[in-house]
Amino acid sequence: MRFLMIGAGGIGAYYAARLQTAGHELTLTARGKHLQALQKNGLKVQHPEFQFHQPVTALDHATLIKSQSANQFDLVIISLKSGATPALLTELGDWLASADTPVLSLQNGVDNEPQIAVQIGDNRTVGGLAVRIGGHIIEPGVIDAKGPAQVVMGAWPNVSNTSELQHRLQPLVDAFIAAGIPTTLSDDIQYQLWRKLLINNGVNPLSALTMLDTRALTQHPAYGKAVYRMMEETALAAEADGINLSKADVDEMFNLICNFDAIKTSMLVDKEKGRPLELEEICGAVLRRCAALGKEAPTTELIQALLKQDINT
């Protein structure tokens, strides 16, 4: 199969390496020094259970548009930061809309799929999440990753609306599994995305504020309680999208992150590197929906405010 990975960062590059090792044809997009390193030296991925160092096809977006058609791919995967989605759709929207290839979002948050669907339609939009994986660029062309690195995907927003697309996804799921990527096809991907946001809002902002990894954060007697409260606030916010997240959902996701490998969250890494944080895409998604419901999310509101002040001082 042919896959396009838009955004060869820590997460996208890991999955691309797995797929290429299994014999699939990959095209990756990147920019700057990372792109130059990929083109010159290939991609190197370090994972406790997987090592990869091979030449890869890496392009910038302008070259991609000129040299390839979206119809050439069996699946387009977007693994950029959520804040980059609007600019990406402005840049590649017409190119993507000219094809009938499914587009899978492997991004944080719950607002990417709706934006993609506006551009290309529900019948091609695939919701997705990367589960139990930490991955970061440690130097241009070199990725460090850890964790089981599972994927959940499904027709957006659920199969009742796009059952034909769900049928098209099964061979892609099979290809992921055969490549060593544990993958599940979900009938209700919007629900699954909100479950992941429980973790993202629970640990990402607070880890960036405290500079602690997930294990140190969740095992701290005070910070661990704050993580749980932010997860509860996320469950409240989900009601605005018609999603019911129960206490059992919150407890399950909290226990999962408490017992996961000690990793730096993506927001912590962005903070260390002086990059923009996905605050609006994570905290903001919770706060906007709670406000619309007339509900309070005081812990999320406080942590976001403290982070914004910290960034601006």
Image (tube, helix red, strand yellow):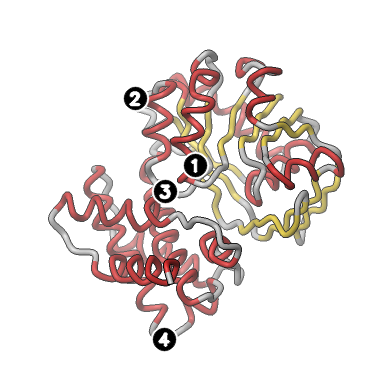
Which circle, 1 or 2, is nearer the viewer?
1
Which circle, 1 or 4, is nearer the viewer?
1
First of labels 2, 4 by sequence position: 2
**Image quadrant occupied by the N terminus:** top right
Image vertical order of residue 220 relative to residue 110, above or below = below
Name the amino acid type tagged 1.
Answer: Ala
- Check disc 3 and report the residue beneath it: 109
| Dot 2 and dot 4 residues touching (CB under 8 Å) | no
Q: Quadrant of residue 86?
A: top left
Residue at point 66%, 40% (across, down): 177
First of labels 3, 1 by sequence position: 1
Name the amino acid type tagged 3.
Answer: Gly
| Dot 1 and dot 2 residues touching (CB under 8 Å) | no
Element carrying mark 3: loop
Badge 1: few (under 14), some or many (20 or more) residues near its Cα, within 10 Å?
few
Tag on residue 161? Answer: 2
Q: Distance from label 1 to label 4 (Cα)? A: 35 Å
Q: Distance from label 3 to label 4 (Cα)? A: 27 Å
Element carrying mark 1: helix
Which circle, 2 or 3, is nearer the viewer?
3
Tag on residue 221? Answer: 4
Tag on residue 84? Answer: 1
* Image coordinates for residue 143, horizontal then vertical, percent: 73, 54
Question: Farthest front residue?
Answer: 313
Q: Quadrant of residue 283?
A: bottom left
Name the amino acid type tagged 2.
Answer: Asn
